[in-house]
Amino acid sequence: MSTINPYENALKQLQDAAKLLKLDTGVYDFLRIPKRILTVSIPVKMDNGRIKVFVGYRVQHNDARGPFKGGTRYHPAVTLDEVKALATWMTWKCAIADIPYGGGKGGIICDPHKMSVGEIERMTRRYAYAISDIIGPYVDIPAPDVYTTPREMAWIMDTYSALKGQISPGVITGKPIPVGGSEGRGEATGKGVAFCIREGAKKSRIKLKNADVAIQGFGNAGTFAAQFMEEMGTNVISISDSKGGVLDKKGLDVEKLIKYKAKNRKVGGFPNSKQISNEELLELDCDILIPAAYENQITKKNAPNIKAKLIAEAANGPTTPEADEILFRKDKLVVPDILANSGGVTVSYYEWLQNLSRDYWDHNTVINRLEKNMVRAFNDVYKTAMEYKVDMRKGSMVLAVSRVTQAINNRGIWP
Ligand code: NAD
């Protein structure tokens, strides 16, 4: 894990946008400081009969444009600053997607891979109870993130509904379909990344047919991105997970790799592939790079060695601000996280709309609407970047910050 503080990166990005927009210093402070930070202790009776206390967070960054919205991360390396950064990025992401939400994020410091299903359920339900006073369908709507899945979302929805005495599917998104989940939510982030790559390839004149693609991370975001890149005719040459990566210059068979990973719990050792490290994957000779794991993977140290022409950030915060400058100077097109991975929250919004209206949309309706929204968002950001003569990260930040600022100004400061 990197020691670079993601919250400092998030603040630097905001500072850059504030300068470009000549933002009022009061509004800048409003956007810099999260509206509410909740730290909770989560006592859990473990399978051995002993009590273990976990620490969890819910950070609500800004709700000028609508209820707070953002995922819940389970990971041993979760820190409050990481959750603050992720909550801040959610505010910008929802503004770029132009959906009526603000930004929030949650996390628990834990290692779910070393816990039983029962322990994870008891921890999840106790966390849901601990944050239940500050979440709600019109207040703050959590969702999945790293190492949380529809299963955990169903437990949170059930616990919240039990506490409030009414079924409340709209309190959380990313649920299983039988309890109010949406068609297309599982694949939404990967699909959105693929739409952005298609649009980005047009701008950077990359022919997608047989373009070489490397993907770091093979979870929800990485797996679906890999499938869609293969469907679009690219050659997925390398994929990694936390234990390392595999490379086959002729192209990996993504479906076979998914089955291999499900059986072996790692991509390493996949037949006919060469073993490589996560660091080597980032520097591979390829056309398109998709970081889909964690923060701070592309830094000033390895940015000079990145060969891909187009980098689409499925992960949140994979590139540091110094690395951004280097990539921009090298004429790389970086499709920033708050745009590239916004497909997830966009379909979460569709799920929420279906929950509030007790309706169900079919798969085509969801994906067609997602595609339209992603293409519009990509072009809005690209246009802003061209207008300000900056990279797409700064362009996306300028667009997001100006939209949130407009909402703050329209609402005014109460009292
Ligand atoms: P996930 O838990 O499904 O998968 C995480 C993947 O990363 C796993 O394959 C894991 O093995 C791998 N990984 C862990 N440590 C790694 C390391 N050091 N190097 C390389 N790979 C490593 O999580 P996810 O939902 O796919 O999230 C991945 C990233 O995408 C995160 O940054 C998350 O915030 C972002 N994201 C996800 C969604 C979503 O809808 N799932 C939406 C927006 C953004």
Image (cartoon, rainbow, N blue to C red):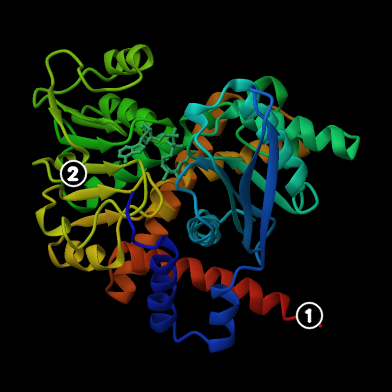
The residue wearing badge 2 is: 279
Q: Is 326 on the left or on the right of 49, as rendered?
A: left
Q: Secondary structure at mark 1?
A: loop
Q: Nearer the viewer, mark 2 or mark 1?
A: 2
Callout 2: CB less than 8 Å from ligand 1: no
Quadrant of the picture in which ligand 1 is shown: top left
Q: Nearer the viewer, residue 358 or 271?
A: 271
Alpha carbon distance from label 2 to label 1: 49 Å
Identify residue type, mark 2. Glu
The residue wearing badge 1 is: 414
How far across and down, in percent of the image, does residue 180 sit? 70, 28
Q: Nearer the viewer, residue 57 or 329?
A: 57
How far across and down, in percent of the image, does residue 9 sit? 38, 66
Say which quarter of the image contains residue 48: top right
Which disc is residue 132 wearing? Answer: none
How far across and down, in percent of the image, does residue 401 sit? 50, 71
Q: Is 126 on the left or on the right of 29, as rendered?
A: right
Looking at marks 2 and 1 on the same chain, the residue that comes earlier in the sequence is marked by 2
Residue at 48%, 39% in the rendered image: 146
Q: Is residue 51 visible?
A: yes
Residue at 13%, 20% in the rendered image: 273
Q: Quadrant of the C terminus?
A: bottom right
Say which quarter of the image contains residue 214: top left
Q: Residues within 10 Å of mark 1 (few under 14, many from 20)?
A: few
Identify residue type, mark 1. Trp
In contact (CB < 8 Å): disc 2 and disc 1: no
